[in-house]
Amino acid sequence: MNSSPSQTLNKMSVASLDDFVFGSAPKPVVCGRGVEIGMGQVIPEINFTLPPVDINAATWPGIREQYLEMIQGVCQRAVELEVPALLVEFETLPPMTVRPQWGAEITRILADTLHRYHDKYGLKNALRLTPNDTRDHERPPRMRHGPYWDGMLELFNLAADAGADMLAIESTAGKEISDTALMEADLRSLVFALGVLASRDMEFLWKEIVSICRRNSIVPSGDTACGFANTAMTLAEQRMVPRVFAAVVRVATVPRSLIAYEVGAVGPSKDCAYEGPYLKAIAGVPISMEGRTAACAHLSPIGNIAQAVCDCWSNESVQNVRLLSASAPVVSLEQLAYDCRLMNTATASSPQDARRLRDWLTESDAARDPQAFVLRPDVVLRISRVIIEESTPFRRTRRAVFAALDEIVKAHRLGELRLSHQEVGWLEKLRRQADALPESEEALLGEMLAANNPPKFLPAEYGLPM
């Protein structure tokens, strides 16, 4: 009953801390109009969205105009700032996936503008299309059937003709279990959601995406555990769950996100996938990351360390509102451009200077919060080696929990990580929960199936027995 992806990544792609730096990845990606990712330079990835608006047929012409305004503004500023290349991400809003033609229309507006700026100004650029996962709009969600899945599939298939250079998604399978598990700091249910449900869906979903991308000669980039680990991070910022729990959740999402690359995704990973450093270390793919420049979208305790080994540097998303200097998307692009310029200057100076900047970015955050600590490059490499010792997603998820707890406990004992008395108490509670986790997937699955009444998840939608 174990679920194993097509190709298990069981060797480290990055073996040495000296080789684990921003801008360089073992398996770089070339896409779009001359964009090279992971080949020595960090490039900005800009994402923008609408201010609050009802999306319907009556407002649609104005929505099209807003996207045209946003893409023209960021492209013009990118030219003025002489960015080495520009990656634009379009994350659809739910109505644009439910009605796939709308998503394709906006994609075409963005793509046409990017082509125009490349032809006129030589701006190297690429467009990433990220349809949102609408399957959880009904509960319990149907992951492999129904109108929401059909709409996503249609938009995937429209992507290339609409001008997208790569596909991504923020998939949400397992959230019907994890949402409650996060609020209750319930490791058992969380491991089931990530290691059993989400992992099965990742293989199903990404085989579809990779197949579509290969047929249409576009890049299958990556996924993100945003709906799990970033939810935990947000709850921790609001003091609704322990920070040590959010840190463990972050590491526990790694095996689930890794599956996309085991079935054919090539990167760059999604910006909001803060598990990205682990994916780079194991799979060797370039990664997009976000941190302090994503404060326009959400607050976090990892604003600098998230930049330490990035290959694209992103803002998460920003609404199209006017600020004192310019529109918010243009302002956000400028912030990203200057951050990338600094990293690229360090790289051009010397490998030692690049590592020095990486280490400063790391040290400024790592000791202040366990969520930052588990992104420390040396910690990432150690935990990654432990994770890949296991061969199934469930076993890897379970092992990730133990590895994260071990690293956090050790760091606190050595004075490398500051934790409050309450957080230390939670470490002990989480360790007891981890020790009680079943060693076999079958045991946990049987337990969760027996308790699934009334049904919170539909077993058949994950290829499981009823």
Image (tube, rainbow, N blue to C red):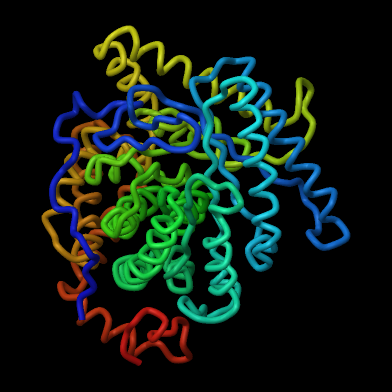
Question: Where does the image place residue 334, in percent across and percent down from the top left?
Answer: 61, 22
Asked whether 223 or 396 is in front, the reply is: 223
Work out which quarter of the rendered image holds the N terminus and state it.
bottom left
Question: Where does the image place residue 12, in percent across and percent down from the top left?
Answer: 16, 43
Work out which quarter of the rendered image holds the C terminus and state it.
bottom left
Question: Where does the image place residue 183, in percent across and percent down from the top left?
Answer: 47, 64
Rendered residue at 31%/89% (across/down): 465
Instruction: In the rendered view, tell whether residue 334 sits above or below residue 278.
Output: above
User: Residue 426 falls in which quadrant of the image?
Assistant: bottom left
Q: Can residue 451 be seen?
A: yes
Rendered residue at 78%/48% (across/down): 64
Question: Where does the image place residue 42, in percent across and percent down from the top left?
Answer: 42, 25
The single residue placed furthest to the right in the displayed view is: 58
Q: Is residue 183 left or right of residue 113?
A: left
Rendered residue at 45%/31% (across/down): 35
Asked whether 98 or 411 is in front, the reply is: 98
The single residue placed furthest to the top in the displayed view is: 349
Q: Is residue 194 left or right of residue 173?
A: left
Asked whether 259 or 235 is in front, the reply is: 259
